[in-house]
Amino acid sequence: MYELEVMKMICHLKSILSLLDMTQTELADILDVHRNTVTNIMRHNTNFSFDLAYRILDVINGRAKEKGIQKTWTVEDVWEK
């Protein structure tokens, strides 16, 4: 399984969730992961699978569409090298 090495990346997820009025807990619940998983991703404390990265993108892009925000985030937008 391929993983993102987040220790070397800047994570923009916190600001994106804020823009979408979404909490870490809400994101974790939708993804069916523990809230600490989301927190650790945002704090660069864990590597995680590309599958989870794309599931996160699906959630945030879906929320943006619901809110009428015309933005589609990519892996590169959320996790900047």
Image (spheres, rainbow, N blue to C red):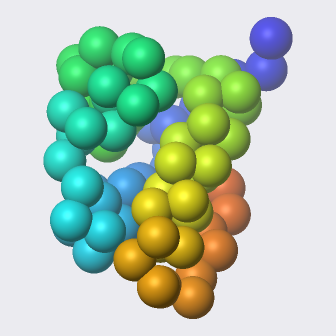
Residue 55, image quadrant: top right
Compare residues 45 and 54 and report the one nearer the observer: 54
Compare residues 73 and 70 and report the one nearer the observer: 70
26 to 79, vertically: above or below = above
| Left or right: where 42 falls relative to 71 | left
Compare residues 63 and 42 and report the one nearer the observer: 63
Residue name at image x 80 percent, y 11 percent: 1
Q: Residue 19: x and y, percent?
A: 27, 74
Q: Residue 10: x and y, percent?
A: 43, 57
Compare residues 3 and 21 and report the one nearer the observer: 21
Count of all numbered marks drawn on residues in the image:
0
66 to 63, vertically: above or below = below
Residue 7, image quadrant: top left
**Residue lying farthest to the right in this orientation:** 1
Any part of residue 64 in sight:
yes
**Residue lying farthest to the front in this orientation:** 66
| Left or right: where 35 falls relative to 3 | left
Residue 24, image quadrant: top left
23 to 50, vertically: above or below = below
Quarter of the picture holding the C terminus: bottom right
Residue name at image x 62 percent, y 49 percent: 58
Residue name at image x 21 percent, y 65 percent: 21
Residue name at image x 58 percent, y 82 percent: 71
Q: Residue 18: x and y, percent?
A: 21, 67
